[in-house]
Image: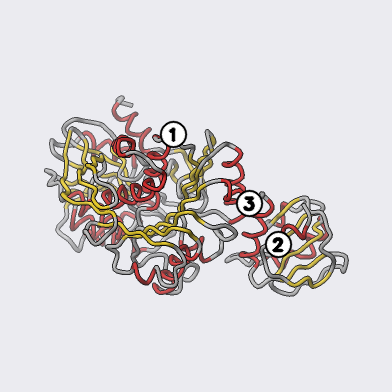
Amino acid sequence: MKLSQLLEQIEYTCVQGGLDKEIKSVVYDSRKVTPDSLFLCIKGAVSDGHKYAKEVVEKGATVLVVQDEVEVPEEVTVIRVENTRYAMACISAAWFGHPAEKMKVIGITGTKGKTTTTYLVKSILENAGYKVGLIGTIEAIIGDEVIPAANTTPESYIVQEYFAKMAEAGCDCVVMEVSSQGLMLHRTAGFVFDFGIFTNIEPDHIGPNEHKDFDDYLHCKGLLFKQCKVGIVNADDEHVQQVLEGHTCTVETYGLHDNADLWAKDLKLVTGKGVLGIDYEVQGLMDFPVEIDLPGKFSVYNSLTAIAICRHFGVSEENIQKALRAAKVKGRIEMVKVSDEFTLMIDYAHNAMSLESLLTTLKEYKPKRLVCLFGCGGNRSKLRRYEMGEVSGKLADLTIITSDNPRNEEPQAIIDDIKIGIGKTDGKYVEIIDRKEAIAYAIHNGQPGDVIVLAGKGHEDYQEIKGKKYPMDERDLIRDILAGK
């Protein structure tokens, strides 16, 4: 592809060299440079691509896209832009032939609910006959291909590569999680979302390598609504107007009150054999009853979000109802049937905020006992351990403290930190370092009416110990325990 074609969507200065060059690859990793490459000098948290300018030229790169000065031979074309991350998104879109224009693209942002909502949308649309690609925290799904995720929102080049593969595989639409980091780092630049969704926002991802403060976090979430045609937002979130500030899209709302365009009423908690769910009535832009085998108010919001999106695809009420009843998201309040007498679920809750939200929701079902099994990651803040211990001690009737990903720390030391938090409460606990033994204890000691939560691992299928990842999927552990292994 001609360099001039790749640069059509960006403002730039040609510092040296010519634009009449044929480009054979677009690269942002110096290790992957081949002859006639265009190399993007990206400034990352760990390294700066500008430092590799001479090295990549020696490997055959003939064009460098930069935001700082570099010294390279005069026959090398140097393109200067304001922000190389933004340029990478636009150049990548052009390189792959603007694949987003061939499909409907749905972007979902928010502190909580992104993952569950993407799978609910995928389930509903596929049930209605659409072919749907997915990009998210757990994985990317392209037809029959499943690619484990490294980031919630991948680098822009990867996003465009996935889009191209999805279009080639015949996908009609794509649903993707859009993180605040992804928006801040321009990973979703270079195309326009057909639908941008806002679920909710709470203080999170604030720190040295993330957002400087909550206002910055809000601002970055709001960028989605300057890059989509239709914005669908949670009217009940107190920060929704700040998120929409300066928006350029048409706006629709959903929520639990009749001031929203689409709203839920008459919420009823449902308990069955080993299952917790909720029923409600959709009102406003659509009008029908909904049943979901997922517990709590946040499940109402997640399903309502999915309905608000799928309405635009002409999906029938029957298809929406059927898909929502069958929807299941790996590691997100995922019910695993082990008994008709009590309920067991796996959830990714791995910080105090998410654990408190989950346990508070489950207490509304008035279980005989609420049992919470969790550990905390090694090489991470001790504060998280204290906080999670305190939350579980306060809300659970029994806490089973075990190991999560100890990494380079001793599991017992992490457990001792968690116990400091539990010590601030009157909560009962047991400690069992081996996670499989801990899960076996929870199952074998389950009582009629109990709700047991295995928290922290969620979709993860490994345990990280001393720098190595070992296979460990809680679903496999449960199967082994039930089989007497």
Instruction: Please name the amino acid that badge 2 sits on.
Output: Glu
Question: Which mark is on residue 129?
Answer: 1
On the rendered structure, is 339 left or right of 5? left
Helix, strand or loop for disc 3? loop
Q: Residue at x 17, y 35 (%)?
A: 272
Q: Position of residue 468 (x, y in %)?
A: 51, 46
Q: Nearer the viewer, residue 406 or 72?
A: 72
The amino acid type of the residue labelled 1 equals Gly
SS type, badge 1: loop
| Structural distance between the alpha carbons of marks 2 and 3 | 12 Å
| Disc 3 target residue | 98
Earlier in the chain: of badge 1 and badge 3, it is: 3
- What kind of colouring is applied to the model shown? secondary structure
User: Is 327 or 409 nearer to us in this picture?
Assistant: 327
Question: How far is disc 1 from disc 2 in space, using C-alphas?
Answer: 36 Å
Disc on res. 8: 2
